[in-house]
Image: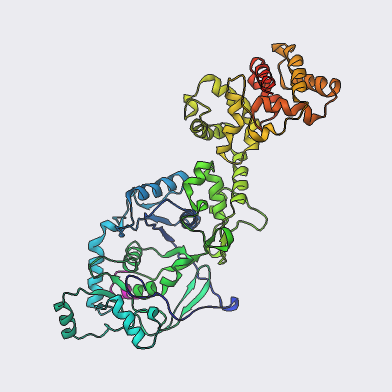
Amino acid sequence: VGLDGTSGLRGTMELMTEAENTKPELPEHVRVRFCPSPTGIPHVGMVRTALFNWAEARHTKGTFVFRIEDTDAQRDSEESYNQIIEALNWLGIDWDEGINVGGPDGPYRQSERGDIYKDVAAKLLEAGYAYESFSTPEEIEARNVAAGRPKAFGYDGYDRDLTEEQKAAFRAEGRKPALRIRMPDEDVAFDDLIRGRIEFKAGSVPDYVIVRPNGDPLYTLTNPVDDAMMNINVVLRGEDLLSSTPRQIVLYRYLIELGVAKEMPLFGHMPYVMGQGNKKLSKRDPESNLFLHRDNGFIREGLLNYLALLGWSIAADRDVFSMEEMIEKFDVRDVKANPARFDLDKAISINAEHIRMLEPQDFLNRAVPYLNRDGVVSADSWDALTDREREVLSASVELVQPRVRLLGEVAGMVGSLLSTEGYIEPDDDAKKQLKDSAPAVLDAAIAALSDVAEDDWKTDFLHETLNKSLIEDGGYKPRLAFGPVRVAMSGRRVSPPLFESMEIVGKEITVARLQGLREHL
């Protein structure tokens, strides 16, 4: 039983067969909204909701409204509010009306709209669509048990027809009433934009609370009232809110009668996002944390592309596309109703494709803050780097860009190229690759490279020189020949191409690193 003494839904919800399924036409001018609650770090489910609303608005040349539902003083935070705005700005999801933009229907934070909700609640009460309810959750449970119903059956309609004397008696006890909506005794049905026809049987949704006894309005009132007053005509939201839709439809009918709403919006309920082991992705799962993905080096194009695939596809044989292409093709009626699984490996591989599509300078500009964070360059913007840092990064971009999947991997690839150290301590997995022949290989490589003139210190010549010295003359297999040289150059098992790296680093540092590793063996 919830705070309001109801268990939400009881009884049945029916989905129609495909034959009966009808997905409605969209209105001529689509108005959608994104209205998160600022309770924690933005998560991928929230962003997917924003993305689909944004794409629908942009596809139809409609209007995208962004407002904040912050009436829960216990859970809402200003930090979370700022993070939601930061997330949308980073992803490039822009809005036409709402927070920081303004518009005709403000304010766009629910915490600043209290008088509006009071006014509408009073009109609902006066018209008989809402009534005062004095029952406590404990009393509701006790009545259910006494009547042989399950304790958590929910609210039983007890206060629907209280007399003025009964209400006065409750008030004399010091009780304050909640306000409940009077649900009609009839089926509630609607055509979902994603799921088709959905029906809720009469009696399956109890009369529900819209205002707490202390006067605080609940989501059940504020959300539909805001939608009505902002003329939202397409409501796209998560499947977890489907059980509240019959309540909203009934309240909308009352709001239309009262002249608060112009029309009933269309509803579309997007599929769950699943995490590991067939469980719904929770806010607490690391994969759901948007900023963690950004910290790891997802670029917005890659992450948005992947989130778009959680319930929708551009074509059966295509996974990689731009946001411009998504806008051109997106129709919410093509979204699948089945749960979508968040697959981190697939997300990373799609991100890698988008990294490869960046212009090289754009790639470097985006990589620099990660390189600065990881301590391999001196500043967090391209223009503030030293000449040498810019030179090395420009020379290495075509080696690195095709090989990284996340911007967080760039430091591991270029750290050794930027370093001026004569010895790099090898990683454990790189050390394991060094065989007994490594000292002799390094001695031969040092001897061969020490004779190369500065003017000849080029990729192809270095390759030929070591090939002759180690493979033709030395008789080593390529892996045994070049493995120790690679470990000396980068300290890593996986690194940028070897001979190109030697050219970028230069003769002095290359020879010093080979000698450095040799001395440590």
Residue drawn at x 53%, y 50% as measured from the top left = 304
**Residue 512 picture quarter:** top right
- Does 173 sit above or below residue 117? below
- Does 400 sit above or below residue 274? above
Give left or right: position of 509 versus 433.
left
Give left or right: position of 285 versus 470.
left
Q: How many marks?
A: 0
Quadrant holding the C terminus: top right
Residue that extends furthest to the left in the rendered view of this protein: 172
Give left or right: position of 162 versus 354.
left
Q: Position of residue 432 (x, y in %)?
A: 70, 34
Task: Identify the magenta region.
Answer: 253-261
Quadrant holding the N terminus: bottom left
Q: Position of residue 206 (x, y in %)?
A: 36, 79
Q: Nearer the viewer, residue 89 or 475?
A: 475
- Does 411 sit above or below residue 320? above
**Residue 127 picture quarter:** bottom left
Q: Nearer the viewer, residue 191 or 390?
A: 390
Residue 279 visible within the image: yes
Residue 152 is inside the magenta segment: no
Residue 91 visible within the image: no
Give left or right: position of 136 versus 458.
left
- Does 504 sit above or below residue 278? above
Q: Position of residue 389 (x, y in %)?
A: 54, 23
Q: Nearer the viewer, residue 268 or 283?
A: 283
